[in-house]
Image (cartoon, rainbow, N blue to C red):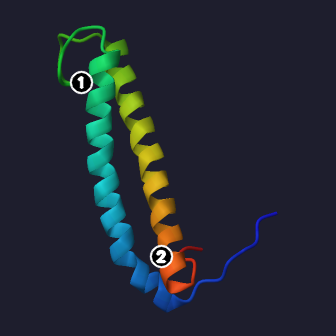
Amino acid sequence: MAHKKTTSTSAKVLYRPVGILSGVLSGALAGIVFKQVWKKASPKSVDDAPSALQSEFPLWEILAAAALQGALYATIKALMERGGARAFERVVGEWPGD
């Protein structure tokens, strides 16, 4: 079982800007990564992934693009949040979550 780390209220408040910044950066990075992956994975050579309202794409392709985009976003966001929390802990000495 993992050791539970305690967090003070001040550490949570101090971490908020770091958390917001990591959320914005992870969203931007996920968008960039998704565009590059979609260029390689797309059955057609289109630059942009299909959206739900584009009738020229089959449903399976729209769903595949949405699932890939969601998975990449969630993975990158988790990595960025965890990295930010670890860096915050090294600098401040307290874990920002829980």
Q: Which residue is mark 2?
A: 88
Image label count? 2
- Identify the amino acid type marked 2: Phe
Percent position (x, y) of residue 65? Answer: 34, 24
Residue occupying image coordinates x 30% and y 50%? 27
Task: In the rendered view, tell whether residue 67 sits above or below residue 9.
Answer: above
Q: Quadrant of the C terminus?
A: bottom right
Q: Is residue 58 placed above or below 3 in the rendered structure? A: above
State which quarter of the image contains the N terminus: bottom right
- Mark 2 or mark 1: which comes first in sequence? 1
Query: Residue 67 falls in which quadrant of the image?
Result: top left
Judge whether residue 32 can be spotted in this image. yes
* In this view, 8 is above or below 3: below
- Residue 71 position within the rendered picture, expressed as x and y whole percent measured from the top left: 45, 36
Give the residue at mark 1.
49
- Mark pair 2, 1: CA separation: 36 Å
Question: Disc 2 or disc 1, which is closer to the eye?
Answer: 2
Q: Residues within 10 Å of mark 1 (few under 14, many from 20)?
A: some
Answer with left or right where residue 97 lies relative to residue 80.
right
Q: Residue at x 26, y 39 (%)?
A: 32
